[in-house]
């Protein structure tokens, strides 16, 4: 049996090591594992931090035992006899080990919705259990010339097993959220179904092997009497020469699966200001449970080399173990067949089944504070396979992992205790798509450990971005749900302002008349119109009496254009300057005072309200100022104005009257001459009046000479006063008419 198979089939990659207890220690606790999360709990991909994620390549390997000790520097050493045989085997009994390489091949995950994600994954693994191995026997087989045996070592008939299996998985995963969005108690689950192609399987068992290990001539030998059974099985693929293309050479087939659930307690955290909440780790604590590696691989020995040997080495007969030196396990069978005196082989041709290393995994993860970057993870891995036959198995393991993480970087410190290598402390990092770590590096820095491990990987994906939802109008309602994204509004109106149905500038919540335009002081209702006259009360001076707009809502009962409140005679048409009353007629002659030239004396309309005599008196008074040329009956030019005025009065004020134009003189001169002169002067006035427009038939000229003086003739002034022309109404003064002929 060659050293690499016996010590660690995990040297497949030669430079990869990983944690014995749980794969990818530290890294597996991160919230940013993407598609790789399905390998730890298939529920992890539901509501994860990635829109999509691709694993390019990731690997971890392990070498660990319950015996011996490793230094951190051993990670870089090649697995030759001098490096590791001394550490693990020489002088050791009941050696147990768990060794594996776990390579995560190209895998992809996509988030179909906030509740659903799917993944397609590939994975290849080499897994080896060693149970109750006699270290001295193993060291002697690997290097019989350097076995370290100085005195005989008895083989006491223990049952031992060294078993390594290689397989490739192609899996499909579904992650689903079960609780509605916004729930404090968040629950999700996931399942992976996978096809398993067995690439290689080898085992070597000893049952009841007795005898003595002795150094004879510098070479290790088994010296009889020796009895017991040795069983060997190898597939067509040799672990000692395992190559990349062997990953797809299947000599066994099977199906398997993983199933997991996660519960998260999410406090009442509001992420509504962001376009989505997928970027955030929203929980305070979560609990995850998963059943992993359920399934088996069925190998058919018809394509294998499988032989069961009965050992019968006679007493004192040596069998040199040098016959195994430099040979791989698939070369052991010809070696044993070459010694039929010591070994009787029986070929094994029936198929057999290898159970995957099924485990129950549970973890509790606690984050410190909202949007926290610091968390701590407590986890346990529990083996569910019996350590018998060809079952692959892990050891029970317990881990406490504090970590700091964000979307780009994480640092984890896994602290682990397991039943095989006991306590180990490690360190893991993630920077962008690259991650690397070890579950034992810190322990190895300070003292020898029972394991050496390393994991490294590269995956790349698009994370959900922390992006604030736009709120253009800054009203607290985001544009994608704001029906009025450019106008500030209220949530109850879906981001629009409070409506103003009637467009009066008063919103409907404050408007008591939503469909009728109004004003604020009336709570959005129109200004009231109590009397229903179409004039609102604020402009209506007669609120309770219907009126007209031009009179500010007041009536005008008499229709005189003066509203009743200002009309002193509201039922009689009047004029403004008389307070709405008619123009007064003081003398009661039916001619109002404004048209009545004699408002205090009754008179006919023909004289514009003046008594006729009064009119005549006016003319007569003006005629006193008529001037004649001396001794003649001709008027001076200065008299024209008096004539024109007299014409106007006669035609306009007393147009229906006829007049006497009487001439008078002083007492100077003869009576006949004075009478003729007075008549001539009266005629001159008549002629002047006729000339300016008075009908001739209305005028009668008379001359009275010196008769009827009105002043004394004894003085010049008196005589001047007596030289006059007077006018009289013919119908009024008939007696004078007769006297003046």
Image (cartoon, helix red, strand yellow):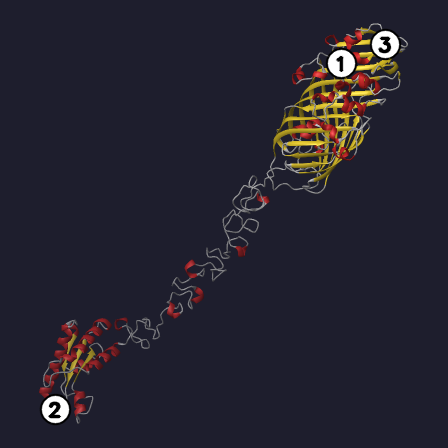
Q: As rendered, which of 143 and 119 lies closer to the eye?
A: 143
Q: As rendered, which of 69 and 713 lies closer to the eye?
A: 69
Q: Earlier in the sequence, mark 3 or mark 2?
A: 3
* Figure check: 166 above or below 655: above
Within 10 Å of disc 3 (Cα), the crowding (few <14, some 14-19, many 20+) is many
Q: Earlier in the sequence, mark 3 or mark 1?
A: 3
Front position among marks 2 and 1: 1
Q: Earlier in the sequence, mark 2 or mark 1?
A: 1
Residue at 26% across, 79% down: 614
In the displayed structure image, the side of residue 57 where residue 732 appears, left or right: left
Q: Secondary structure at mark 3?
A: strand
Marks 3 and 1, how far apart in space? 18 Å
Task: Provide the residue designation for mark 2.
Answer: 668
* Residues under numbered marks 3 and 1 in contact, where contact means CB atoms less than 8 Å apart: no
Task: Provide the residue designation for mark 3.
Answer: 311
Looking at the image, the residue that sits furthest to the front is 217
Within 10 Å of disc 2 (Cα), the crowding (few <14, some 14-19, many 20+) is few
Task: Provide the residue designation for mark 1.
Answer: 329
């Amino acid at each position: 049996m060659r050293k690499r198979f016996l010590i660690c089939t995990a040297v497949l990659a030669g430079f990869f090591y990983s944690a014995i207890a749980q794969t990818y220690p530290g890294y597996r606790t991160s919230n940013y594992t993407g598609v790789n999360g399905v390998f730890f709990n298939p529920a992890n991909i539901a509501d994860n931090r990635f829109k999509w994620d691709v694993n390019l390549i990731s690997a971890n390997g392990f070498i660990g035992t319950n015996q011996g000790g490793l230094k951190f520097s051993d990670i870089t050493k090649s697995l030759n006899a001098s490096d590791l045989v001394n550490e693990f085997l020489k002088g050791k009994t009941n050696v147990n080990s768990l060794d594996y390489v776990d390579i995560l091949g190209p895998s992809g995950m996509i988030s179909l919705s906030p509740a659903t994600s799917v993944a397609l994954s590939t994975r290849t693994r080499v897994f080896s259990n060693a149970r109750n191995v006699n270290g001295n026997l193993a060291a002697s087989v690997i290097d019989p010339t350097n076995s370290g045996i100085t005195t005989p070592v008895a083989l006491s008939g223990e049952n031992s097993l060294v078993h390594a299996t290689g397989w490739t998985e192609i899996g499909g995963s579904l992650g689903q959220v079960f609780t509605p969005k916004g729930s404090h108690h968040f629950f999700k689950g996931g399942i992976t179904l996978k096809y398993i192609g067995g690439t290689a399987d080898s085992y070597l068992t000893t049952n009841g092997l007795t005898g003595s290990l002795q150094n004879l001539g510098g070479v290790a030998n088994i010296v009889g009497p020796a009895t017991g059974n040795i069983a060997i099985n190898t597939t067509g693929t040799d672990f000692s020469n395992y190559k990349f293309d062997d990953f797809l050479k299947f000599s066994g087939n099977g199906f398997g699966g993983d199933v997991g659930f996660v519960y998260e307690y999410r406090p009442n955290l509001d992420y509504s200001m962001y376009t989505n909440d997928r970027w955030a780790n929203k929980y305070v604590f979560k609990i995850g449970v998963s059943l992993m590696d359920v399934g088996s691989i069925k190998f058919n020995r018809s394509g294998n080399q499988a032989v069961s040997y009965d050992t019968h080495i006679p007493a004192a007969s040596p069998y040199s173990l040098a016959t195994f030196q430099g040979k791989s396990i698939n070369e052991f069978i010809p070696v044993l067949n070459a010694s039929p005196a010591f070994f009787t082989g029986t070929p094994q041709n029936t198929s057999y089944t290898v159970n995957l290393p099924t485990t129950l995994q549970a973890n509790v993860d606690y984050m410190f504070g909202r949007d926290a970057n610091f968390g701590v993870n407590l986890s346990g891995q529990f083996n569910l396979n019996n350590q018998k036959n060809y079952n692959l198995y892990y050891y029970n393991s317990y881990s406490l992992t504090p970590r700091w993480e964000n979307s780009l970087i994480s640092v984890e410190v896994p602290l682990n205790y397991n039943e095989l290598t006991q306590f180990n402390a490690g360190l893991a990092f993630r920077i962008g798509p690259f991650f690397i770590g070890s579950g034992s590096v810190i322990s190895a820095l300070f003292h020898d450990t029972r394991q050496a491990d390393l994991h490294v990987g590269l995956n790349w994906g698009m994370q959900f971005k922390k992006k604030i939802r736009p709120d253009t109008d800054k009203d607290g309602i985001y544009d994608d749900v704001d029906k009025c994204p450019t106008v500030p509004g209220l949530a109850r109106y879906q981001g629009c302002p409070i409506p103003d149905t009637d467009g009066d500038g008063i919103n409907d919540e404050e408007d008591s008349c939503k469909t009728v335009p109004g004003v604020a002081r009336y709570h959005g209702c129109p200004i009231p119109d109590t009397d229903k006259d179409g004039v609102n009360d604020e402009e209506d001076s007669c609120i309770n009496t219907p009126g007209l707009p031009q009179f500010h809502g007041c009536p005008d009962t008499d229709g005189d254009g003066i509203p009743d409140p200002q009309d002193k005679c509201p039922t009689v048409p009047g004029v403004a300057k008389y307070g709405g009353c008619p123009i007064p007629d003081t003398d009661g002659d039916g001619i109002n005072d404004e048209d009545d030239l004699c408002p205090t004396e009754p008179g006919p309309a023909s004289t514009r309200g003046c008594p006729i005599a009064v009119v005549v008196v006016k003319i007569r008074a003006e005629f006193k100022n008529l001037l004649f040329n001396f001794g003649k009956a001709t008027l001076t030019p200065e008299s024209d104005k008096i004539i024109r005025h007299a014409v106007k009065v006669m035609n306009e004020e007393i147009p229906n009257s006829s007049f006497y134009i009487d001439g008078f003189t002083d007492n100077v001169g003869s009576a006949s001459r004075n009478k003729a002169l007075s008549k001539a002067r009266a005629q001159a006035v008549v002629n002047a009046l006729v000339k300016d427009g008075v009908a001739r038939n209305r005028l009668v000229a008379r001359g009275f000479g010196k008769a009827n003086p009105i002043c004394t003739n004894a003085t010049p002034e008196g005589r001047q006063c007596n030289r006059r022309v007077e006018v009289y109404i013919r119908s009024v003064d008939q007696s004078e008419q007769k006297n003046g002929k």
